[in-house]
Image (tube, rainbow, N blue to C red):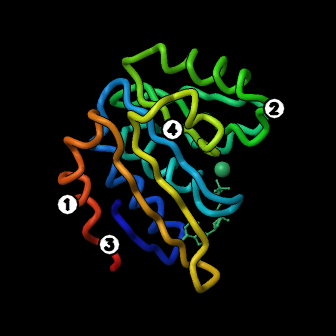
Amino acid sequence: MIRCSTSSEEETRDLGAAVAPLAEPGDVVILTGDLGAGKTRFTQGFARALGVDEQVTSPTFILVRRYQGRLPLHHADLYRAESVDEVADLVLGELADSTGVALVEWGEAALGVIGGDMLEVRLELGPGDDDRIITLSPAGPRWSVRSQDLEKALVPWRSA
Ligand code: ADP
Ligand code: MG
């Protein structure tokens, strides 16, 4: 578990951008935490660093959006998903495309569907209005081998 903190939305974007170079085809990144915690800000930075030029917004009506960068990026927001079956249809359909990377907001609902091979990024509100605590947990074989690289990439934001 890698514990970080940020104190502005741009810092959270930069943190997301620092993770993106580690992404490989078929990766799944689950973003958990409350509304307004910064899941979309993280995704925006991640997308920017993948070379996506389009503006990334919350896919409110469409639950999954695809962007093209160094790798295809599937950005899902399951906030409005109504059932685990719906989550499975949406997310697994996209993940079947193993050439891309999937970032899934409100990923709690997808945890059971996806299994354990993923990077979980938990964002929480911190003490000040603009403070966020961001905990990254690499899980499963795909991400475990990259955990040291991830720790190095996150040095600027690490907290005790
Ligand atoms: P989520 O996708 O988790 O609902 P968003 O990324 O859409 O969250 O929104 C985060 C909100 O919090 C934005 O309004 C942003 O300006 C604000 N904010 C304040 N401080 C931070 C921070 N350190 N990191 C990310 N967002 C922050
Ligand atoms: Mg969001």
Give the structural element (helix, strand or loop) at label 2.
Answer: loop
Residue topped by disc 4? 103
Q: Which residue is mark 1?
A: 152
Amino acid type of the residue tagged 4 in the rendering: Leu
Q: Amino acid at mark 1?
A: Lys
- Looking at the rendered image, the quarter that the C terminus falls into is bottom left
Q: Nearer the viewer, mark 2 or mark 1?
A: 2
The image's mark for residue 158 is: 3
Specify which label sits upstream in the sequence, 3 or 2.
Answer: 2
Q: Earlier in the sequence, mark 3 or mark 4?
A: 4
Q: Is mark 4 within 8 Å of ligand 2?
A: no
Do the numbered discs 2 and 1 sit on residues whose CB atoms are within 8 Å? no
**Mark 1 C-beta to ligand 1 under 8 Å:** no
Residue in the picture at 68% in, 62% down: 36
Above or below 151: residue 118: above
Q: Whole-Å distance between the Cαs marked 3 and 4? A: 22 Å
Residue for badge 2: 82
